[in-house]
Image: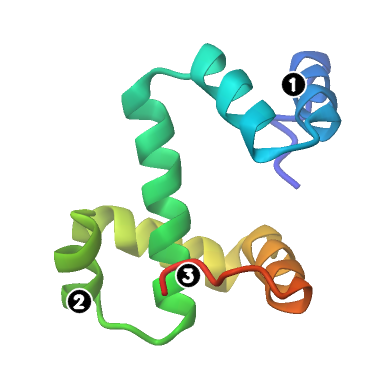
Amino acid sequence: MNKKIKTEAVDHLFEAVLKLQSREECYAFFEDLCTVNELLSLSQRFEVAAMLREGRTYLDIAEKTGASTATISRVNRSLNYGNDGYALVFDRIDGSGEQKVGA
């Protein structure tokens, strides 16, 4: 875990996120919290991660998501050398029967 982000304020934010109980609540909260561009950037990174995990090429991902190769590379670095946060979430999605991201 990155010690730079471990703050009381970030703890409060994460506690708030953990209280959300539905997709509708997530929309309401994140629309209040983020700008449209911030939310779209976050969702794009998540989509890129899903596609990288599926073994898609940078070119294919860039064409389908509009992400820059720099963004794709950053996400790829997180997948390979990060804190396994993406893997944790994808494993839970895969095990829950929910629709897969990037499909």
Assign a secondary structure to mark 3.
helix
Give the residue pinned by disc 3. 50
Lower sequence index among marks 1 and 2: 1
Query: Is residue 30 shown above or below 52?
Result: above
Lower sequence index among marks 2 and 3: 3
Question: Which three-letter amino acid code belongs to the residue tagged 3?
Answer: Ala
Query: Is residue 25 shown above or below 79?
Result: above
Q: Residue at x 85, y 28 (%)?
A: 19
Give the residue pinned by disc 1. 13
**Distance (Cα) linking label 1 and label 3:** 24 Å
Q: Residue at x 36, y 37 (%)?
A: 40
Question: Which three-letter amino acid code belongs to the residue tagged 2?
Answer: Asp
Quadrant where the image shows the C terminus: bottom left
Q: Residue at x 38, y 63 (%)?
A: 48
- In the image, residue 64 lies at what x, y percent? 21, 66
The tag on residue 60 is 2
Q: Quadrant of residue 61?
A: bottom left
Question: Which three-letter amino acid code belongs to the residue tagged 1?
Answer: Leu
Left or right for 65, reference 5: left
